[in-house]
Image: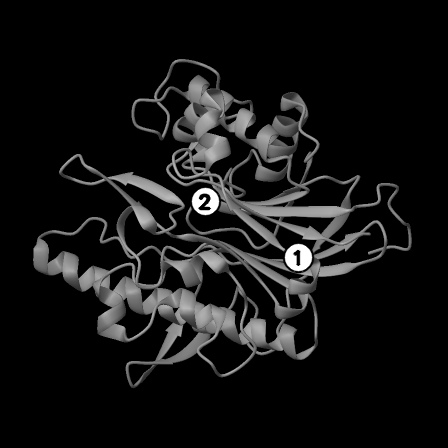
Amino acid sequence: MGASVLPRRLIVLRLGTWNIQWFDHLFDRYGRPRRDAGRSGREGVSCGEQTEAIILVLRALDADGLIIEEAPDARRRRHGVPVLESFAREAGLRTRSVLMGFPSHSGQEIALLYDPDALEARHDPREEGAPRFDGTFHAELDGARRAVTWAKPPLEVALRLGDGTALRVIGVHAKSKNAYNARNPDHAEHLAVENRRKQLAQCLWLRARIEAHLTRAEPLVVMGDFNDGPGLDTFEARFGRSGVEIVLSEGKGPRLVDPHAVAARGRHGAAAPATARFRAPDRRWFSALLDFVMVSPDLLACEPRWRIWHPFDDEGCWRDLVLRRALLDASDHFPVTVDLRLGP
């Protein structure tokens, strides 16, 4: 990554993840942010309102590096990297550099938005433990061998801080279990089960890569939208495990650490942590824990402090009326961050 030492010495490194709902829709064909009253991907929120809300939240997060899911499409003429970098400069964000990896097949990219004065980042895909994430993986699942691919290949990042500290980051947007385009209830059930199988297979693939990093004693952060969580739905009972539990570890190797995943087990309702808020078909709201920041055991020495930027459950977000409104307007997911103390 070069021999230069960056000028900014970090005391605390803040990393995070945020799924920004249909972020791609907020840019015109030339890559300019839309600030008009046109309809956005958010129900009841205009393009201009969502754009301003996203900027306000990004400023409040003040992260050194942020994995964004549903970033602007990299397949079109207006590539997502310059689009996001222009957006960041216009918004006055210090996270003004953008890294993307293998392009998505869904029009929703995974991107790292980062501060180039705080760290260096490069796309560094590996084949250790499992194939590259733009390839095919064969998973043993339900007594059968299944071939699986990623519509949104995870982003593998090699980070280097100003003091030379090296860190691995994997940004994830796993398969959704929602049965889109179902013709009837039976078809919906079939699609949901197949989607769950694919999501679990993707998590097995991801876990194989994680174990390779942990075997090499490489400090690792795995974060993103897993579209899953411990105790989230009836599929977990059917398959005996959640995808998130597979990624953390099923007791067969070193565990990644995420306190929200631990807190979610056996807890439901208001007491359970949540990172997303959706409106159900009956127009009622429900919450779910879908987004995680998992760290390798060696990073526990860095006194990690996790935070879900939830507009109702986090006291700081709740008391800041402007931030609370922005979090609700910006996305149906809320950011998750971790602070790692890397200096004296």
Residue 39 visible here: yes
Snapshot colouring: one colour
Instruction: Residue 234 in the image: state x and y as whole percent.
Output: 21, 64
Left or right: 105 as drawn, with respect to 182: right
Asked if 194 appears above or below 332 in the picture, the reply is below
Q: Position of residue 20 (x, y in %)?
A: 46, 38
Asked which secondary structure carries label 1, the reply is loop
| Residue nearer the viewer, 274 or 333 | 274
The residue under label 2 is 108
Disc 1 marks a residue whose amino acid type is Glu
For label 1, the crowd category at 10 Å Cα-Cα, with few meaning under 14, some 14 to 19 and many 20 or more, is few
Q: Nearer the viewer, residue 314 or 186?
A: 314
Q: Is residue 13 left or right of residue 30?
A: right
Mark 1 / mark 2, whichever is N-terminal: 2
Most extreme residue toward the bottom, as rendered?
143
- In the image, residue 325 lies at what x, y percent? 42, 24
Question: What residue is disc 1 on?
Answer: 303
Q: Find residue 91 and report its image quarter.
A: top right
Q: Position of residue 337 (x, y in %)?
A: 56, 46
Question: Which tag is nearer the camera, tag 1 or tag 2?
Answer: 1
**What amino acid is at disc 2?**
Gln
